[in-house]
Amino acid sequence: MSTELLDGGTTATTGGTTQTFDRTSTQVNNGYDYADVSESNHLLREHVQITSRAPALQVDGTYSKFKAKVQFIRPIQLADGTISYCIARAEIEYHPEATSTDVDELREMGGQCFIGNQFDDLFVAGTLPA
């Protein structure tokens, strides 16, 4: 069994309409929260949260990895009136000596894992790629 990614491939989102997210006062460790304030019901506003952690010098003289995370949060109101928060999360970690080319390639390959159609069944039905 195997799955395929495009080495050197690109990922892009096209079409659709722009949705604006404004920065909120919600506290997020090492980052910021943004909300679609066009939704009048605060409980049903979609959010984007962005965080990052810089590499730090360790006691043994090595550096920890850089880490960045973005998550999209979509609240849905359930039939019983309660609200559930659906989350899509993207995260990257790399050593500070990684080149910008290394990071770009990591993002492109990782992006394919998230939006490539070979993973549709995993995210929709929970089945693993064959």
Image: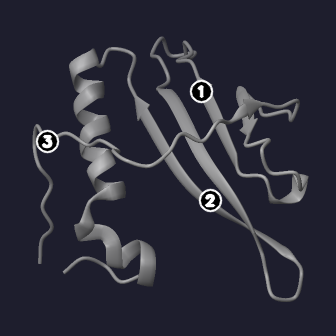
**Callout 2: helix, strand or loop?**
strand
Check contact, mark 2 vs mark 3: CB within 8 A.
no
| Residue 101 vs residue 45, the one in the foreground | 45
Q: Which residue lies under the disc numbered 1?
A: 52
| Residue 83 vs residue 36, the one in the foreground | 36
Q: Quarter-wise, where is residue 87 in the image?
A: bottom right
Q: How is the image coloured?
A: one colour
Q: Where is residue 111 in the image (x, y as percent from the top left)?
A: 32, 47
Q: In the rendered view, does 63 fall on the left or right side of 82? A: left
Q: Which residue lies under the disc numbered 2?
A: 87
Upstream in the sequence, badge 2 or badge 3? 3
**Callout 3: helix, strand or loop?**
loop
Check contact, mark 3 vs mark 1: CB within 8 A.
no
Q: Looking at the image, is 37 positioned above or below residue 118? A: above
Q: Where is residue 39 in the image (x, y as percent from the top left)?
A: 80, 51
Q: Quarter-wise, where is residue 125 in the image?
A: bottom left
Q: Looking at the image, is 39 positioned above or below residue 104? A: below
Disc 3 marks a residue whose amino acid type is Gly
- The residue shown at (63%, 31%) is 51
- The residue shown at (54%, 12%) is 57
